[in-house]
Amino acid sequence: MKIRRLVKHRLSVLVLMGVVLTAAAQAPLDDRLTGDLGVAVYNTQKIVRTQAAPSVTLPYAYFDLGRFYSRVDTFGFKTARLGSGHVEVAGRISFEGFKTDAPGLQGITPRANPLPVGLGTYQETPWGAVFAYSFYDATSGGMLHELTYAAEFKLGAVTVYPQIGAEHRSRNYVQHLYGVSAAESQASVFGAYSAGSSTTPVLAMAFELPVTETWHINLQLRRRWLDSAITRSPLVSTHVQDSGFMALTRAFQ
């Protein structure tokens, strides 16, 4: 089993290296900084029992700079041309892990944040944008696949971005976060739980409100509907997860 995982890991590295080398032969992209930079207040509802959801203030980055890009929590490097976009080497910043020092989680081991890395693409078309990513999580050995469609329309001076999508997490990914081992069950008040794979629909609305010609306020509200692979975990206390942020940003064009 370890040999098989090692082979898969090395094959993945070789594929990524091949994609990056292919990009070197492509025509260079515009090296201007375009997009938004600023600071945001983020809040994500915790779905694990006894976990609070404090707001955190962090940088906000949604920009393109040559082959490099950042899309809030996803960042990476554009390689070969594909349709209306590129094949992208991508990484994801995830805060799905959690500490277990609260009294209600005694006996449960802490869950490290996933470290998703993989490939994806952003396709900008006349009828909207499509984001597709496939990540390998180095923490759990699991996979995260994601597909999102985003539209854009004006409502007076406000730009609105409705979004719909789905996230699929493999069994190993879900088990790492929400499974309960036999040893943990004996040391805690929770029954043992072996998770399966999870498919989660997602809806979001984002808004861009102009303050001046170059400064904006960006808002996003997002809801995930958790399926039974997650909600059956004795660690989980809800069937939905809400998140959002408010950012003050400067636009670069």
Image (cartoon, rainbow, N blue to C red):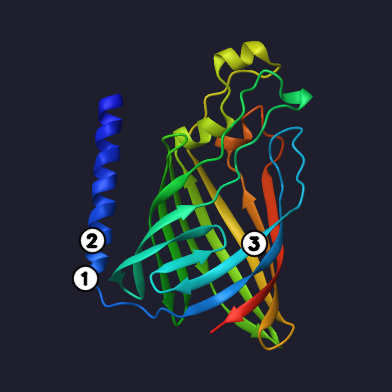
Res. 111 visible in picture? yes
Lateral position of residue 159 relative to residue 125, left or right: right
Q: Marks 1/3: CA distance? A: 33 Å
Res. 80 mark: none
Q: Is 67 drawn above or below residue 215 in the view shown? A: above
Q: Is 55 drawn above or below residue 176 in the view shown? A: below
Q: Provide residue 57's location: percent of width, then percent of height.
A: 72, 57
Q: Which residue is mark 3?
A: 59
Q: Provide residue 123's location: percent of width, then percent of height.
A: 41, 71
Q: Which residue is mark 1?
A: 25
What is the residue that sits farthest to the top in this orientation? 186
Mark 3 closeness class: few <14, some 14–19, many ≥20 residues within 10 Å:
some
Mark 2 closeness class: few <14, some 14–19, many ≥20 residues within 10 Å:
few
Q: Is 215 drawn above or below residue 51 in the view shown? A: below
Q: Earlier in the sequence, mark 1 or mark 3?
A: 1
User: Do the residues bearing badges 2 and 1 touch, measured as CB atoms within 8 Å?
Assistant: yes
Indicate the amino acid at tag 3: Pro
Indicate the amino acid at tag 2: Leu
SS label for mark 3: strand
**Which residue is found at the position 64% from the left and 62% from the top?**
59
Q: Provide residue 99's location: percent of width, then percent of height.
A: 67, 32
Quadrant of the frame with the N terminus: top left
Res. 21 mark: 2
